[in-house]
């Protein structure tokens, strides 16, 4: 499947160049003028004639590509000039991937910028259908490539023209045992618009339309979730109860979406012959199942000394034996907090990046100067944050929902890490720039760590230092412990779905079980928390995606430890790792740093970083 189609399933967002009322309101609130991205580098607007021209060109070129190559690849591979001939075909395929990726990215960005706008929703759906229909003509290509004898492909790659694409060809051939007969592949592909993609859209629009009644105010999901980090306990409680009430009213619909997508995945996995419910994700991530299993086992074994221990410590700070679930991410009592303006957030991240590598900071600065960032909170805008790579012929775009909290600065550092990674990897081309999820979180988490360490080194006040350490520990627990708990929850849901549909109540029971195990006895789950599974988008858009966060965090912890003791040249090796994109296996990329994720000690080293931060917090209490 061309990458353009995969990108349409990702959470992405957009906004025209004109400044919105929300951005002006943010300026008045003390945050400064928040940037709204300019998508003109892709297309000038929904009515840009270039959209229609490129869609028509994609239609014609996909059909022409099929006419030129379908049924002929085996013969080409047997010819004396096999390498050159196949390389020409791959280059043409790559150009189509970039063109269609541009269209798909723009449609996705525009739609997630306001998922409630009927015009954007129609545009997104229409572009998606056109791209799906056009790319049907390309399905044969990778299927036929995989039918060519290994020896012939290897001989053809002796020609440098085709050898350039070796990493991509090897990735394609890893799917060989799981590919189906051409007509079945075509059916799966064409029906994606009315199967999982349609259910993804339903989830997005449902979440965007939810409203929560908090202290007489009607809020969308993002500002309501944000109140769970408010300093006022009554606001945290009111937000949690409002979330639970609205989630409960919509549980049946979310249960239907979850059941349908789990069944859809089970059907695809069964037809393709995947042995385990997460094997398709492992294949996409280019990671061995046993490596993921070792990560999961290491994190679950560490629950008592990480999350259980930390939340018991936090409950003590609040003068309680147990914290209600709405206080899990509450600011520390008596800890100083303030709103951080956009200009300060920008300078903080760029300074931290620049201290590590001027080149890294220069790339990140482009996102601010060229308006590649969309920061204000708006009704209908996709919640959370992301960096969308678009295509190598363009550049990434970053979406935030910036509200001036210290955590928002870390999110900015995180997403700019993704953006820098995507810019550096782009020269590999549309087929080899994308990075598997096992490494996709490396630059983002490393960027966060650089920013955190920079701020911590500048903080002498004991209360401020404690607040910063606690925030970092909570973030790492959310990235490692919570994501492995999410993965455990997904496994339970998908496994049980094989025996029949799950009620919303049953899904809630599974949710509470893994949450209790992972967060520990110091967190008290009040009535309503059993519904909080409904809004997690990764369960819907990218099943089993979540372990990549824990993988990335533990990897970065180990990588940062190497950096702290490294001699000159670490930054250059690090940027070279990012620039490799998808051209190398994670084991090959980690080797220059002396790291091996297949070694059980690797995970223990990463988890030990979190343990040491909790040690420091306890010492500050002494």
Image (cartoon, rainbow, N blue to C red):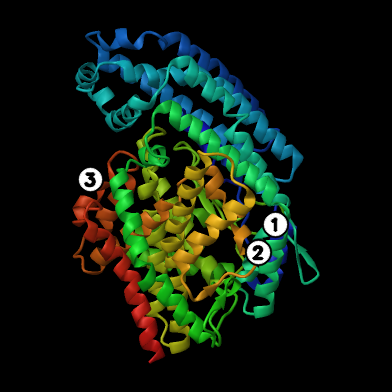
Give the Cα distance between marks 3 and 2.
46 Å
Percent x, y for residue 361?
A: 40, 60
Q: Is residue 94 visible?
A: yes
Q: Nearer the viewer, residue 199 or 91?
A: 199
Q: CA distance from mark 3 to mark 1?
A: 47 Å
Q: Secondary structure at mark 3?
A: helix
The single residue placed furthest to the right in the displayed view is: 216
The secondary structure type at the circle numbered 2 is loop
The residue labelled by disc 3 is 588
Circle nearer the N terminus (3, 1):
1
Q: Residue at x 46, y 79 (%)?
A: 312
Q: Please name whichever residue, 463 or 264, is drawn nearer the observer in this view of the structure.
A: 264
Whether residues under marks 3 and 1 lie with C-beta atoms below 8 angstroms apart, the answer is no
Query: Residue at 28% across / 55% down in the picture?
Result: 574
Q: CA distance from mark 2 to mark 1?
A: 7 Å
**Residue contact between numbered discs 2 and 1, judged by CB atoms under 8 Å:** yes
Q: Quadrant of residue 88?
A: top left
Q: On residue 528, which mark appears?
A: 2
Q: Which mark is residue 248?
A: 1
Which residue corresponds to the image point at 77% horizontal and 72% vertical from the top-left?
215
Q: Residues within 10 Å of mark 2 (few under 14, many from 20)?
A: some
In the image, is residue 457 above or below residue 39? below
Q: Quadrant of the C terminus?
A: bottom left
In the picture provided, is 567 more to the left or to the right than 286?
left
Mark 3 or mark 2, earlier in chain: 2
């Amino acid at each position: 499947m061309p990458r353009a189609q995969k990108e349409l399933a990702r959470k992405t967002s957009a906004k025209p160049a004109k400044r919105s009322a929300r951005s002006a309101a943010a300026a008045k609130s003390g945050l400064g003028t928040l940037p709204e991205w300019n998508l003109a580098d892709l297309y000038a607007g929904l009515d840009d004639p270039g959209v229609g021209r490129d869609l028509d060109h994609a239609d014609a070129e996909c059909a022409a590509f099929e006419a030129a190559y379908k049924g002929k690849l085996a013969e080409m591979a047997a010819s004396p000039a096999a390498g050159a001939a196949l390389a020409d075909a791959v280059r043409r395929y790559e150009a189509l991937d970039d063109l269609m990726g541009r269209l798909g990215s723009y449609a996705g960005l525009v739609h997630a910028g306001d998922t409630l706008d009927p015009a954007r929703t129609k545009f997104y759906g229409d572009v998606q259908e056109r791209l799906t229909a056009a790319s049907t003509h390309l399905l044969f290509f990778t299927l036929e490539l995989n039918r060519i004898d290994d020896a012939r492909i290897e001989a053809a790659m002796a020609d440098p023209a085709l050898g350039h694409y070796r990493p991509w060809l090897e990735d394609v051939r890893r799917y060989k045992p799981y590919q189906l007969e051409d007509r079945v592949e075509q059916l799966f592909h064409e029906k994606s618009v009315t199967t999982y993609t349609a259910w993804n859209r339903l989830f997005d629009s449902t979440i965007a339309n939810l409203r929560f009644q908090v202290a007489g105010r009607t809020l969308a999901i993002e500002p309501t979730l944000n109140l769970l980090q408010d300093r006022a306990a009554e606001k945290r409680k009111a937000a949690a109860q409002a979330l639970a009430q609205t989630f409960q009213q919509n549980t049946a619909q979310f249960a239907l979406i979850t059941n349908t997508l789990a069944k859809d995945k089970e059907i695809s996995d069964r037809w393709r012959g995947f042995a385990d419910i997460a094997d398709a994700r492992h294949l996409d991530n280019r990671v061995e199942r046993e490596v993921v299993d070792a990560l999961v086992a290491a994190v679950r074994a560490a629950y008592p000394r990480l999350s259980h221990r930390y939340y018991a410590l936090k409950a003590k700070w609040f003068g309680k034996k147990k914290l209600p679930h709405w206080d899990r991410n509450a600011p520390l009592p008596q800890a100083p907090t303030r709103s951080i303006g956009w200009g300060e957030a920008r300078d903080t991240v760029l300074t931290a990046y620049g201290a590590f590598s001027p080149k890294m900071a220069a790339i990140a600065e482009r996102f601010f100067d060229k308006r590649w960032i969309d920061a204000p909170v708006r009704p209908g805008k996709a919640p959370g944050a992301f960096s969308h790579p678009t295509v190598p012929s363009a550049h990434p775009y970053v979406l935030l929902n910036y509200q001036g909290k210290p955590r928002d600065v870390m999110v900015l550092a995180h997403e700019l890490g993704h953006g820098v990674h995507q810019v550096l990897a782009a020269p590999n081309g549309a087929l080899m720039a994308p990075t598997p999820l096992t490494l996709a979180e490396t630059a983002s988490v490393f960027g966060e760590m650089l920013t955190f360490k920079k701020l911590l080194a500048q903080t002498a006040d004991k209360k401020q230092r404690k607040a910063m350490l606690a925030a970092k520990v909570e973030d790492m627990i959310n990235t490692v412990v919570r994501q492995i708990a999410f993965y455990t929850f997904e496994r339970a849901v998908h496994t049980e779905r094989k025996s029949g549909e799950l009620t919303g109540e049953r899904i809630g029971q599974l949710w509470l079980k893994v949450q209790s195990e992972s967060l520990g006895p110091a967190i008290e789950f009040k009535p309503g928390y059993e519904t909080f599974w409904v809004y997690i988008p990764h369960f819907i858009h990218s099943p089993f995606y979540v372990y990549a966060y824990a993988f990335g965090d533990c990897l970065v912890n180990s990588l940062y430890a190497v950096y702290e003791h490294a001699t000159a040249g670490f930054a250059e090796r690090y940027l070279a790792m990012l620039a490799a994109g998808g051209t190398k296996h994670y084991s090959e990329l980690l080797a220059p740093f002396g790291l091996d994720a297949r070694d059980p000690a690797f995970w223990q080293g990463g988890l030990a970083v979190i343990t040491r931060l909790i040690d420091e917090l306890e010492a500050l209490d002494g």
